[in-house]
Image (spheres, helix red, strand yellow):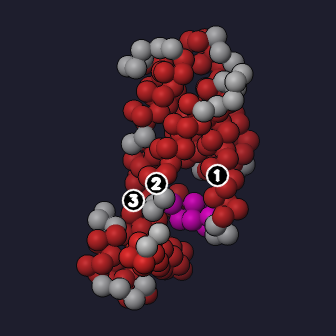
C-alpha cells in the first residue's frame, strides 16, 4: 500500500473511530458531522469525501467486505456442509469476530437498536446483499436464479443477525432462527 492509500485509510479510520466514540458518549442524534470532523482533525468536506452518505455511514465502514464474505460462505463451503449451515456459521461467526475485534461492539449494537435511523440503515445495508446472496444460493442448490425460495432464504438469513441481537440471548435466538430456516430449506431441497 502506497503512502497516499495509507493516509486515506488512516483518515477513514480516524473518522469512523471519532464518530463511534462521540455516538456512544452522547447518542447518535446529539452529534453533528462538524463535531465528528473536528474530533478527527479533518474538514467536513473531507468527511463527506470518505463517507458520502453522511454520519450514518461512519458506523458501517466495512460493509463492502460483507457481501464477498456471504457469497464465499455459500460458494466455498466444505463438501457435505449445507447452505444453511454455511450461512449460520457466517452470520454467527461474523458476530463473534466483531465482538472480539471491537471491545465496544455490544455498546455499538445497543446504539443501533435504540436509534431508529441507525436500525433502519442497518437493515438496508444488510438487505442490499440479498440479490447477490440469493443468486449464490440458487447456484449452489442447482435452482433457477430467480427462485423464490432462494430469495426468501437470503432475505431471512440476512435478517437473522438483526432479529437475534434484539433478544436477550443473542446466540440462542440466532440458533433458533437458523433451525427454522433449515427446516424450511429441507422442504424445498431435501438438503439438511
Earlier-in-chain disc, 1 versus 3: 1
| Disc 3 target residue | 117
State the image coordinates of residue 145 (x, y, percent, origin top left). 40, 20
Earlier-in-chain disc, 2 versus 1: 2
Query: Disc 3, disc 2: CB below 8 Å?
Result: no
Q: Secondary structure at mark 3?
A: helix
Q: Which mark is residue 95?
A: 1
**Disc 2 crowd, CA 10 A, few/some/many (<14, 14-19, 20+):** some
What span is colored magenta in the figure?
A: 105-112
Earlier-in-chain disc, 3 versus 2: 2
Which numbered disc, 1 or 3, marks the residue closer to the eye?
A: 1
Give the residue drawn at x 30%, y 85%: 43
Q: Secondary structure at mark 1?
A: helix
Distance, label 1 to label 3, CA atoms, is 21 Å
Instruction: Classify 31 as above or below 171.
Output: below
181 left or right, relative to 9:
right
Q: Camera-side residue: 70 or 153?
A: 70
Q: Quadrant of residue 191?
A: top right
Regarding residue 39, the answer to whether it shows in the image is: yes
State the image coordinates of residue 122 (x, y, percent, origin top left). 45, 53
**Disc 1 crowd, CA 10 A, few/some/many (<14, 14-19, 20+):** some
Is 107 magenta? The answer is yes
Instruction: Classify 39 as above or below 115.
Output: below
Q: Which mark is residue 155?
A: none
Query: Disc 2, disc 1: CB below 8 Å?
Result: no
Q: Secondary structure at mark 2?
A: helix
Give the residue drawn at x 68%, y 39%: 89
Q: Which mark is residue 63?
A: 2
Distance, label 2 to label 1, CA atoms, is 13 Å
Distance, label 3 to label 2, CA atoms, is 17 Å
Amino acid at each position: 500500500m502506497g503512502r497516499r492509500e495509507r493516509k486515506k485509510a488512516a483518515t477513514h479510520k480516524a473518522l469512523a473511530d471519532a464518530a463511534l466514540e462521540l455516538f456512544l458518549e452522547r447518542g447518535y442524534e446529539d452529534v453533528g458531522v462538524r463535531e465528528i470532523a473536528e474530533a478527527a482533525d479533518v474538514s467536513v468536506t473531507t468527511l463527506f469525501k470518505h463517507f458520502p452518505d453522511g454520519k450514518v455511514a461512519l458506523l458501517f465502514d466495512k460493509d463492502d467486505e460483507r457481501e464477498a464474505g456471504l457469497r464465499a460462505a455459500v460458494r466455498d463451503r466444505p463438501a457435505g456442509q449445507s447452505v444453511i449451515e454455511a450461512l449460520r456459521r457466517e452470520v454467527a461467526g461474523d458476530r463473534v469476530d466483531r465482538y472480539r475485534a471491537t471491545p465496544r461492539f455490544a455498546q455499538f449494537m445497543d446504539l443501533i437498536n435504540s436509534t431508529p435511523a441507525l436500525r433502519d440503515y442497518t437493515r438496508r445495508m444488510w438487505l442490499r446483499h440479498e440479490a447477490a446472496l440469493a443468486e449464490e444460493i440458487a447456484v449452489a442448490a442447482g435452482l433457477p436464479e430467480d427462485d423464490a425460495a432462494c430469495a426468501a432464504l437470503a432475505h431471512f438469513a440476512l435478517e437473522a443477525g438483526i432479529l437475534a441481537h434484539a433478544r436477550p440471548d443473542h446466540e440462542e435466538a440466532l440458533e433458533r432462527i437458523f433451525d427454522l430456516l433449515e427446516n424450511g430449506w429441507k422442504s424445498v431441497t431435501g438438503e439438511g
